[in-house]
Every structure is written in C-alpha cells, then in structure tokens.
C-alpha cells in the first residue's frame, strides 16, 4: 500500500492528494470531497482541480481543512496575487488575493444566497455592490493592528495561528496608514501596534508593550512622524471623522468602519431604507460612536428623538461629544438586551441595529418587535447569523422586504449586508 493510498483512505495533517473544487463556503474556503469526506480548502476557486495539503482534521474526522498547494486546472477567475505574502503558509489577513475583484463579489453573493436559503429559508439572490474608496480591492484599510514577533519585527498572523509573518507593507492599508512606518522598523518588547488614519487627515498609533518588562518609550517611538498621535496602550485618544459634512469624535480604540467609503454609504443606505419622518422616535442598537444616531437625528428633527444604545464606555463618550449640540439624541450605556428588557420605552417608530457577527438573536429581536416599529434596518457582517435572524423574524411576524450587500472588505471573505424588515400584512 503506497503512502498516497494511505492518505486517500484516512488523511492526516500533512497528507497531499488531488481534488475537484466545488462551491464556495463562508470563511474563505471552497468545498471539496475526498472518498466522501468533506474538505474545506483555502487558496482555490470553484471548478478548479488542485493538489491539497491537509492542515487540520475536524472533530470526529467529520471534515478536513486544507490548503491548495498546486493548481492543476485553473479557474478563469484566478489571478496572480498582488501581495507576495499571500498563499499557503503566508499571511492570513486575506482570503482571496488570488481571485479577480469581480469574481470575489460573485462568490460573496453566493455565500449570502446560501445562508439565506439554508439558515433563513429564503430563496433569493443579491448583488454585492462596489464601495468607492479602494483601488481594485487594495489600499482601503484605514485601521490595522500589527503583531510583533520575538525579534521585534511587525507583521500579520498566519491563518488560524499565532505565528507572525513579518511584512514590508500590507497592500490593503491606505498610504496614510503605511506612512506611519510600522512595518519597516523594529519594535522590541512589544506585543502589537495599532494604527488608525482618519478621513480628516489624523493618524494615531497605539503601542501595546509586552508585560512586565519596562519600555523605553522615547526610544521605541523614535522615528514615528511628529504628526502622528501616540495614544498609549488603551487607545482612548480622540480622533475625528467626517461623514457627509458631519464631524464625529472617535476614540482610537473604538469601532469605526475600516473602508473609507463605508460610513457614508451605510449611513445613506440606512436612511434610504428606513425612510424616517420628522418627529419620528428611532432606536439605534449597538450604536457605537453614533454614526447612525447622529445622521438620523438630523432627519427626524427637534420634534423627533433617537435613543442610541451602546455598551462600550469609550464609544458612548465619543457619541456624546459628537451629539452634544443635538438634544434629540439620547445615549444609553448598556447592552442592547438589558436596555430592551428594562422597557425604558414602550414603543418607537423605527429601529436600526448593527450587532456583532454572531447576530442579534432571539432575546433582542423579540424585544424589538414588542416596540411595534413600522420598519427595522438590520446591518450585518455575518451572513449565517443574519440568515438565522431572518428566519426568526419571519416567525415573529416580520418580512424581509429588501437585502443589499456591500464589498467593504475586498480580498477577504467578509461582506456587509443591510436587511430591511416590515411587519407581515395579511
């Protein structure tokens, strides 16, 4: 019995064999089968024939994880990766450097459609829309955290690993982020460095030293441009972003959309789908630094009200600074489910929510429905969790009336969706 035959019978980590690649799956993989066993393969495309190397065996050997290490029959959608650090064994920051931008968007639309059908029980198609502000999928990341290896070299982690891949430059970051010059200098006794560049021309770096060794701060930061703010370990320094003429205060460590075109596009899309009216009472859950709350407050006017609910103290503080001249914005520092359970309000006109990738879930959605809004806008970065919540909303008497998707994370498998729900009408 040959070694290859052994691998075919019962593959283990390191084994190699040929497979035909099937459909794309969420997470940057494509699906293949070998002797009836499911394999999730990275660095490939549907329709290709490749040699894979097993990288992990799933619990109970129910599935395998593998990398495509040799392409025998290439897809017409394959391209030479622009980044020299991508591919098997390289940086894990990108999933689809080897895929043309148009094909990336098509694959994401397939992932969304599969999630809507499998988890949501809805058979529908959605086009993934281009977001302005990148260069064919590159040069869009305005926020990045670099890891540092034992030698003090900055880089990014391998896929599903704590190993640091030192890099000269990440092609996803903007020129302003790269100009901070993190990746071309040494960072002794440092765990990570986070870099932020804003739409208003500000930049900041947050350095996290390795405990417990003391750090010579002056020496460590020598060479960082004087225009770059050093905000310390916690990332609480104040920065500013501009969206459609409105200036937002943002803590360096708080969440903000990383694609430069995302904040304005998402805000416009939310307002278009909600169709707020003067005097409306709006609830904004998982409100962050108040991106939607402030924009909606300007639409509903002084006779309206926006209740923004956010659990992160720094984000709430930033939202209060931004909205201080808008008395119709109320900021509540609380978890969404806790605030809704307290029944501080009995009803509202509209709801927008932007939960984490795990989704909103039954407790939050059931309590939102009790508020009897006329429409709900649900922003999601997780197709599978959105699908589950679509099914739940249907059981609660609500219909998914529109679904849009945006390519806010090119060359990665991530995609942003905006779902609109209206009450069932018999």
Image (cartoon, rainbow, N blue to C red):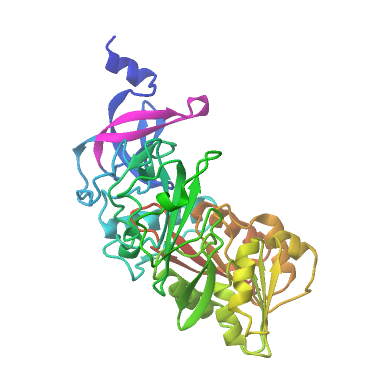
Using the rendered image of the protein, determine whether residue 120 is visible from the camera's viewpoint: no
Which quarter of the image is occupied by the N terminus? top left
Q: Which one is in front, 148 or 349?
A: 148
329 to 377, vertically: above or below? below
The image quarter containing residue 285 is bottom right
Which residue sits at x=32%, y=58%?
Answer: 178
Which residue sits at x=79%, y=71%?
Answer: 344
176 left or right of 240? left
Q: Does the magenta stretch include residue 196?
A: no
270 left or right of 47? right
* Magenta-colored span: 48-69
Image mark count? 0
The image quarter containing residue 374 is bottom right
358 to 352, vertically: above or below? above
Q: Please provide percent x and percent y for residue 346.
A: 79, 74
Q: Which one is in front, 18 or 255?
A: 255
Q: Secondary structure of the magenta portion, mostly? A: strand
Which residue sits at x=26%, y=48%?
Answer: 98
Which quarter of the image is occupied by the C terminus? bottom right
Q: Which one is in front, 179 or 286?
A: 179
Q: Please provide percent x and percent y for residue 150.
A: 40, 35
378 left or right of 49? right
417 left or right of 317? left
Q: Please provide percent x and percent y for residue 260.
A: 39, 69
Q: Does the magenta stretch include residue 62?
A: yes
Using the rendered image of the protein, determine whether residue 157 is visible from the camera's viewpoint: yes
104 to 69, vertically: above or below? below
Q: Please provide percent x and percent y for residue 114.
A: 45, 52
């Amino acid at each position: 019995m040959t070694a290859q035959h052994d691998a075919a019978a019962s593959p283990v980590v390191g084994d190699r064999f040929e497979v035909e690649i099937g459909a794309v799956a969420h997470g940057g993989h494509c699906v293949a089968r070998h002797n009836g066993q499911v394999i999730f393969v990275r660095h490939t495309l549907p329709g290709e024939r490749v040699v894979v190397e097993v990288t992990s065996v799933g619990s109970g050997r129910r599935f395998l994880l593998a990398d495509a290490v040799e392409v025998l029959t290439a897809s017409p959608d394959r391209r030479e990766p622009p980044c020299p650090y991508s591919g098997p064994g390289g940086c894990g920051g990108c999933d689809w450097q080897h895929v043309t931008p148009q094909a990336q968007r098509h694959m994401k639309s397939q992932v969304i459609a599969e999630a809507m059908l499998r988890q949501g029980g809805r058979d529908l198609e959605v086009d993934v829309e281009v977001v302005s502000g990148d260069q064919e999928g590159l040069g869009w990341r305005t926020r990045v955290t670099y890891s540092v290896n034992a030698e003090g070299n900055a880089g990014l982690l391998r896929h599903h690993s704590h190993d640091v891949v030192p890099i000269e430059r990440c092609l996803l970051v903007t020129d302003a982020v790269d100009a901070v010059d993190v990746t071309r200098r040494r960072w002794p006794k440092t765990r990570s460095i986070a870099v932020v560049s804003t739409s208003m021309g500000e930049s900041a770096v947050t350095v996290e030293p390795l405990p417990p060794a003391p750090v010579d701060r002056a020496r460590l930061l020598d060479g960082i441009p004087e225009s770059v703010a050093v905000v310390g370990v916690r990332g609480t320094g104040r920065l500013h972003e501009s969206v459609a003429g409105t200036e937002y205060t943002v803590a360096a460590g708080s969440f903000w959309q990383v694609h430069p075109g995302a904040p304005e596009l998402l805000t416009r899309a939310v307002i278009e789908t909600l169709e707020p009216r003067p005097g409306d009472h709006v609830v904004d859950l998982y409100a962050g630094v108040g991106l939607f709350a402030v924009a909606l407050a300007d639409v509903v006017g002084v006779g309206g009200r926006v209740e923004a609910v956010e659990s992160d103290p720094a984000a709430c503080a930033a939202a209060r600074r931004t909205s201080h001249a808008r008395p119709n914005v109320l900021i509540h520092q609380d978890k969404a489910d806790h605030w809704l359970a307290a029944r501080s309000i009995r009803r509202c006109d509209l709801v927008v929510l932007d939960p984490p990738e795990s989704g909103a879930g039954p407790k939050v959605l059931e309590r939102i429905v009790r508020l009897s809004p006329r429409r709900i806008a649900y922003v999601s970065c997780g197709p599978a969790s959105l699908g589950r919540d679509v099914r739940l909303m249907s059981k609660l008497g609500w219909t998914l009336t529109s679904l849009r998707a945006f390519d806010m994370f090119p060359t990665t498998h991530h995609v942003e969706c905006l779902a609109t729900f209206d009450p069932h009408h018999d």
